[in-house]
Amino acid sequence: MSNRKLSASQNTSRLLFEGRVISVRLHSVVEPDGVAATREIIHHRGSAVILPRNDDGKVLLVRQFRFAVGAYMWELPAGSLDAGETPLQGSRRELAEETGCRASSWQKIAEFYPSPGFLSEKMTIYLAEGIRTGTARPESDERIETRWFTPRECREMIRKGQICDAKTLVGLMCLWDARLRKGSGTAQKTGRKNAR
């Protein structure tokens, strides 16, 4: 076993930008191998991602314009966590806001960092089942279309490049992996007790 230092140490940190959702800081650090480096880091409190699945096995996606890439994208419902909010609380709120849906069963299926080289954001994905529909309440700057898709339709959209959002790809991959494991008898049972 190596005795090498496993974490970086920080010498200085300077705030470059403070926004509503993110802050950007310039960090002067010493890496675990002793090399001095400068890191530009976007700090984000984290996001909730929801994979809503109905009793027919269809997945609910939302379509909205993403200014950063200049395109409309099909995605899983998601959003930034509010201050003090847990990922499960954020998931429930975002599902209701963006789609009008509520779910009776929640299961955490993944946590991941979309771009850990420069972004601190952690995304937590919940599978939401026992879906009840309602009226969406999107934020004033959101224009969202919703639609249910079969797993086959989702796979075809991925193949054609119509789903190219990272959180959606990760969520669908986890769902399909769980279905494969269920077929082999190793999947965990979904239910309220699995939610955290």
Image (spheres, helix red, strand yellow):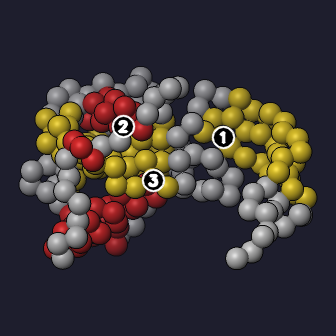
First-in-chain label (3 vs 2): 2
What distance separates the C-alpha of mark 1 from that of mark 3? 17 Å
Q: Amino acid at mark 1?
A: His
Looking at the image, tell me whether mark 1 or mark 3 is earlier in sequence order. Answer: 1
For the C terminus, the quadrant is top left
Q: Residue at x 75, y 32 (%)?
A: 17
Contact? badges 3 and 2 (CB < 8 Å): no
Horizontal and vertical percent for residue 47?
Answer: 47, 41
Q: Residue at x 40, y 25 (%)?
A: 139
Mark 2 Cα within 10 Å, few/some/many (few <14, many 20+)?
A: many
- Is 149 above or below relative to 24? below
Q: Nearer the viewer, mark 2 or mark 1?
A: 2
For disc 2, the marked residue is 88
Question: Which numbered circle lies on residue 111?
Answer: 3
Distance in Å between CA atoms under marks 2 and 1? 21 Å
Which amino acid type is marked by label 2? Leu
User: Disc 3 to disc 2, how far (Cα)?
Assistant: 12 Å
List x then y, in percent, for residue 109.
34, 55
- Tell me where residue 23 sits by quadrant: top right
- Residue 43 is tagged as 1
User: Residue 91 vs residue 148: left or right?
Assistant: right
Mark on residue 57? none
